[in-house]
């Protein structure tokens, strides 16, 4: 299939685990996404404030030291400038309450941990298609 030239999609990945950041960046780069990574909520909000108009999707970890993913999600979805950015939460499979709470706060999709890079890329491709 020939792909038409289109605007490169920009994804912000927020996770406190370096292995997750490395894995997601590796696979999203293969998918021709422009990936920005950061490891905490404070830094994430700074990047969002600067680049909200170019960020298409945020992959957001819930459990992080300092500000957790819920608080970031809530801030994004209640801000007029940020609320249209697609937010995909990283959740641990067995934590069903994470999904319920994320849903209430406006999360658009979920990716459950543990995941493979291939699965992640497939899911992101579907969401951004
Ligand atoms: Mg974490």
Image (cartoon, rainbow, N blue to C red):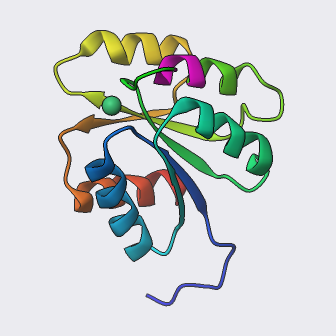
User: 26 or 9, which is in the foreground?
Assistant: 26
Which of the 4 image quadrants contains residue 125? Answer: bottom left
Judge whether 84 appears above or below 27 on screen. Answer: above
Residue lying furthest right: 80
Q: Is residue 122 visible?
A: no
Quadrant containing ligand 1 reads top left
Where does residue 44 sit, x and y in percent of width and height?
60, 39
User: 3 or 12, which is in the foreground?
Assistant: 12
Residue drawn at x 50%, y 35% as measured from the top left: 40
Judge whether 42 appears above or below 101 on screen. Answer: below
| 80 left or right of 54 in image | right
Location of the N terminus by quadrant is bottom left
Residue drawn at x 34%, y 66% as measured from the top left: 27
Asked whether 69 falls inside the magenta stretch, the response is yes
Residue drawn at x 39%, y 26% as measured from the top left: 64
Magenta: main secondary structure equals helix
| 6 left or right of 22 in image | right
Where does residue 114 sit, x and y in percent of width and height?
17, 40
Where does residue 69 sit, x and y in percent of width and height?
48, 24
Judge whether 126 appears above or below 104 on screen. Answer: below
Residue lying furthest bottom: 2
User: 102 or 35, which is in the foreground?
Assistant: 35
């Amino acid at each position: 299939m020939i792909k038409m030239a289109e605007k490169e999609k920009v994804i912000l990945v927020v996770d406190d685990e370096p292995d997750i950041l490395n894995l997601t960046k590796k696979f999203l780069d293969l998918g021709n996404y422009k990936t920005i990574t950061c490891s905490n909520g404070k830094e994430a909000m700074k990047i969002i404030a600067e680049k909200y108009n170019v960020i298409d999707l945020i992959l957001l970890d819930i459990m992080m030291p300092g500000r957790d993913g819920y608080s970031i999600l809530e801030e994004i979805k209640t801000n007029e400038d940020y609320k249209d950015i697609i937010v995909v939460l990283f959740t641990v499979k067995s934590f069903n309450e994470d999904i319920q709470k994320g849903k209430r706060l406006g999360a658009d999709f979920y990716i459950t941990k543990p995941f493979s890079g291939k699965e992640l890329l497939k899911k992101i491709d579907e969401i951004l298609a």
